[in-house]
Image: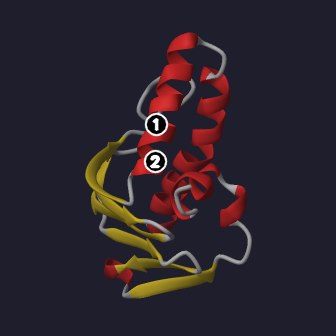
């Protein structure tokens, strides 16, 4: 269960740069990218809810829908909590990543020694606004 949720989360993070590359070049996508970048530069914190759907290449649902909430505070702090189908909490202070699986009574702790700065999320959320 935890591996499935972690895979879904990681797959979602990996799709962001691919989707950005696919959208690049069209006028509408450039406007959307500009709006997103402006929002991220001017926002020091945010809270929201999400519904996550994983689809296969044919567009069919490949896993049960996940729902939950997130919040972040710049620089470096975020929480991503899955509520359904299984509860899981993913948190970071910008230096350490914690993945809590309450059903397994387990917490995984990882140092973010260099992986995070190479991601698009780091450049938009973790660095102070200029």
Q: Which of 68 and 115 is in front in this view?
A: 115
Side of 7 where 43 appears, left or right? left
Q: Where is residue 30 in the image (x, y as percent from the top left)?
A: 56, 21
Cβ atoms at labels 2 and 1 below 8 Å apart: yes
Quarter location, residue 80: bottom left
Mark 1, secondary structure of its residue: helix
Q: 10 Å neighbourhood of mark 1: few (<14), some, or many (≥20)?
A: few
Quarter location, residue 46: bottom left
Q: Could you say which disc has been placed on residue 36 in the image?
A: 1
| Residue under numbered circle 2 | 40
Name the residue at 38% across, 82% down: 104
Q: Position of residue 47 (x, y in %)?
A: 27, 57
Name the residue at 41% across, 33% down: 61
Quarter location, residue 96: bottom right
Mark 2, secondary structure of its residue: helix
Q: Nearer the viewer, residue 74 or 69?
A: 74
Between the residue at mark 2 and the residue at mark 1, the CA separation in whole angstroms equals 6 Å
- Colour mode of the rendering: secondary structure
- Image quadrant for the N terminus? bottom left
State the count of labels.
2
């Amino acid at each position: 269960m935890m591996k499935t949720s972690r895979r879904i989360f990681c797959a979602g993070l990996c799709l962001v740069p691919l989707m950005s590359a696919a959208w690049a070049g069209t006028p509408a996508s450039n406007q959307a990218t500009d709006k997103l970048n402006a929002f991220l530069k001017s926002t020091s914190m945010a809270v929201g809810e999400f519904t996550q759907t994983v689809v296969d290449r044919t567009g069919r649902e490949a896993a049960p829908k996940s729902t939950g909430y997130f919040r972040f505070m710049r620089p470096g702090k975020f929480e991503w909590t899955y509520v359904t189908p299984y509860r899981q909490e993913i948190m970071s202070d910008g230096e350490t990543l914690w993945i809590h699986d309450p059903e397994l009574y387990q917490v995984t702790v990882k140092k973010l020694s260099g992986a995070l700065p190479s991601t698009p999320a780091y450049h938009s959320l973790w660095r102070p606004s200029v």
